[in-house]
Amino acid sequence: MRHVRTTAVWVLATLFAGCTAVPATTTSPVTARSPEATDAPATAAATAATNQALVAQADGFTLTVTPDRLELAPGETVTFTATFHNGTDTPIDVAGSTCSAGMTGLLHVALPQAPRGRDWSGIRQAFKDFVLTEGMGPGIVPALQPLVVNMSAGDCGVYAVSSELQPGATVSREMSWKAEIVPGVDALASTVPFEVSVGYDQQNGPPSQPPDGPMISWSPMFKQLMVKGQVHVIGGATALKGPGEIIDAVLADKGYAAWLAKRPASTWSAANLFLESSPTGEGILPKGPAWEVDLFRERNVPRHWAIAFVDPFDAKLLSVTYCNIPCDR
């Protein structure tokens, strides 16, 4: 029998009013205050009921999120049922279509951190250090920061900027996450933070467009009610190579090492380190899961780059693509 964790899960729910946070210290509904009232982040405490429901309230509205489990094995699926209720006596704008009320969810999934792999000398060690310390991941964040993964949800019909939720009405949406980092790569045993949010009470309208000339860019802004929590991935997953070993596979390639040797670190402008997965493969991207290792050179030299792909399970170099001077891509 699998051991089930019995400790409580602590959660927070966070409310943002437009671009201005609204402070709160209780679980009662939060009343928006003027921007002059505070510049501190706004929080409304959420509750974890015995049925695992997480609840946040503000302005007479309630967001309830219930995961169907708090622990799951690698490759298993957790389903989140999110419900938004209009407890006021007036209609309210919600983001997107009425069928979803703009409810979305995401998780922060841990990436492998070790082992570091072998030590090199000269420019190859400089490259390895550069990628591990300066490399960026998806979203232009540090490469080994947890990967932000969107929860999956069914199609919600025709797109709408906003729709109206009537007084006393409730909207529910189911979202899920299969315990994977990317498709085909099981999640590591770890605590996985998640957040589910809903946008309501639209704060701005589209600008007037000039009769002649370019269209003006515009994005709708909503107040946001958010629930945060955690699920736990337990048990072993398929062994993965560490990021250092992935870079070692690139450096061990004679062609790459020769290319790198002629390109001093003073010319390096950026590096990327992505764990990704393509169902079909497209362009230089291979089919299935792979680590992508990129080096770009633009400091005092014309732009050019090298992009390598490495298997995450056995650190086999899958391919290297070079765009040499002159490089227009």
Image (cartoon, helix red, strand yellow):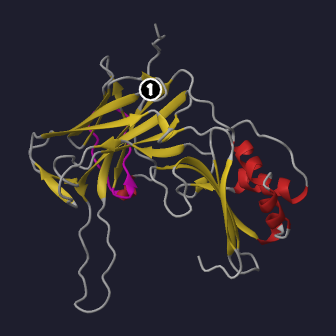
* Residue span colored magenta: 18-34
**Where is residue 172, by image quadrant?**
top left
In the image, residue 277 sits, relative to residue 49, either above or below, namely below
Of the 4 image quadrants, the one containing the C terminus is bottom right
Q: Position of residue 167 (x, y in %)?
A: 9, 44
Secondary structure of the residue carrying tag 1 is loop
Q: Nearer the viewer, residue 135 or 76?
A: 76
What residue sits 37% from the left and 42% below the top?
151
Q: Position of residue 160 (x, y in %)?
A: 20, 60
**Where is residue 25, by image quadrant?**
top left
Q: In the figure, is residue 57 to the left or right of 124?
A: left
Query: Which residue reaches farthest top?
Result: 1
Q: Is residue 204 visible?
A: yes
Q: Nearer the viewer, residue 247 or 83?
A: 247
Q: In the figure, is residue 11 to the left or right of 204?
A: right
What residue sits 24% from the left and 72% below the top?
206
Task: Verify whether residue 31 appears in magenta.
Answer: yes
What residue sits 70% from the left and 56% below the top?
134
What residue sits 68% from the left and 77% below the top?
303
Query: Which residue reaches farthest right?
Result: 121
- Mark 1: few/some/many CA within 10 Å (<14, 14-19, 20+): few
**Could you tell me how many numbered marks the image carries?**
1
Q: In the figure, is residue 9 to the left or right of 140?
A: left
Residue named by callout 1: 10
**Where is residue 123, by image quadrant?**
bottom right
Q: Is residue 27 visible?
A: no
Q: Position of residue 83 (x, y in %)?
A: 23, 36
Q: Position of residue 30 (x, y in %)?
A: 29, 41
In the image, residue 158 sits, relative to residue 59, either above or below, namely below
Query: Which residue reaches farthest bottom?
Result: 212
